[in-house]
Amino acid sequence: MFNIVNYLRECRRVLYVASRPKRRDFEQIVKITGLGTILIGVIGVLLSFLLNIV
């Protein structure tokens, strides 16, 4: 059964350990995420073109 007290204790522990990322780390995360999004978009467009040609 789900124990709400343990869940809240774990949430508090995670929030206590977690910290805001440094500016450099945040910029790196944004760049990697952006590149991944662009890459998936390009693959989608290429597949769409290939499937429409056939």
Image: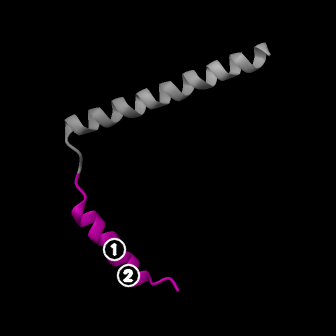
Which part of the image, by quadrant, shows the C terminus? top right
Report whether 16 appears left or right of 6.
Answer: left
Q: Which mark is residue 44?
A: none
Q: Residues within 10 Å of mark 1 (few under 14, many from 20)?
A: few
SS for dot 2:
helix
Q: CA distance from mark 2 to mark 1?
A: 6 Å
Please identify the dominant SS of the magenta region: helix
Toward the top, the furthest residue is 53
Residue 37: image location, x then y, percent: 48, 30
Q: Which residues are magenta?
A: 1-19
Foreground pick, 22 / 42: 42
Mark 2 is surrounded, within 10 Å at the Cα level, by few (under 14), some (14 to 19) or many (20 or more) other residues, namely few
Query: Which residue was labeled with disc 2?
Result: 6
Residue 20 horizontal/vertical position (percent): 23, 49
Under mark 1, the amino acid is Glu
Dot 1 corresponds to which residue?
Answer: 10
Q: How is the image coloured?
A: one colour
Task: Give amino acid for label 2.
Answer: Asn
Do the CB atoms of the residues marked 2 and 1 lie less than 8 Å apart?
yes
Callout 1: SS: helix
Residue at the (23%, 45%) spot, across then down: 21
Residue at coordinates 50% horizontally, 25% vertically from top-left?
39
Task: Say which of 49 and 9 sits in front.
Answer: 49
Within the magenta stretch, is there residue 17? Answer: yes
Residue 7: give x, y in percent of width and height.
40, 77
Image spot of residue 25 (x, y percent): 24, 38
36 relative position to 23: left or right: right
